[in-house]
Image (cartoon, rainbow, N blue to C red):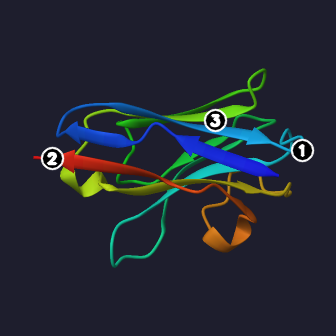
């Protein structure tokens, strides 16, 4: 199983980036796919997640209205469109997969995710 995150880089405040997470090695149809971020010296925080089969989505309050998570089943890829970026959004962004659950909404708990990508760094200059 492999999750390959990409799309990070430097951007000015107010700019946009689109992160991609290519999933391979198994079918993720019943999984929850999530994006987390970790800034230096801080804990890994939930950003957004989507249940692949139902399309149910959840966002952290800090990114609502600015970030959009989506998935492409044909490409087995999850995206995170990030608009109106702020310096506080700077972090290493990780994609992750949580196994199927009976929850109707995606889980936000780091420990619920058992597959992780390698991370892609986003830097935001003011």
* Mark identifier at residue 26: 1
* Label 1 vs 3, first from the N-terminus: 1
* Mark identifier at residue 125: 2
Secondary structure of the residue carrying tag 1 is: loop
Secondary structure of the residue carrying tag 3 is: strand
* Label 1 vs 2, first from the N-terminus: 1
Q: Label 3 neighbourhood size at 10 Å, few (<14), some (14-19), many (20+)?
A: many
Between label 3 and label 2, give the one nearer the viewer.
2
* Mark identifier at residue 117: none
* Label 3 vs 2, first from the N-terminus: 3
Q: Is residue 114 above or below residue 20?
A: below
Residue at 81 percent of width and 36 percent of height: 53
Which residue, as the protein is rendered here, is positioned at the far right?
26
Q: CA distance from mark 1 to mark 3?
A: 15 Å
The residue nearer to you, when weighing 75 against 98, is 75
**Contact flag, marks 1 and 3 (Cβ < 8 Å):** no
Q: Is residue 84 above or below residue 111?
A: above
**Contact flag, marks 3 and 2 (Cβ < 8 Å):** no
Between label 1 and label 3, give the one nearer the viewer.
1
Task: Tell me the residue that label 3 is attached to.
Answer: 78
């Amino acid at each position: 199983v492999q999750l390959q995150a990409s799309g990070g880089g430097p951007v000015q405040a107010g700019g946009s980036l689109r992160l991609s997470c290519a999933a391979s090695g198994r079918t993720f149809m019943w999984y929850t796919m999530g994006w987390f971020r970790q800034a230096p010296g801080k804990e890994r925080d939930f950003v957004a997640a989507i249940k692949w089969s139902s399309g149910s989505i959840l966002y952290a309050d800090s990114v609502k209205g600015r970030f959009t998570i989506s998935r492409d089943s044909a490409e087995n890829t999850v995206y995170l469109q990030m608009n109106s970026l702020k310096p506080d959004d700077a972090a290493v962004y990780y994609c992750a997969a949580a196994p199927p659950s009976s929850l109707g909404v995606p889980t936000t708990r780091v420990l619920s995710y058992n597959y992780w990508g390698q991370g892609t760094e986003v830097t935001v200059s003011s």
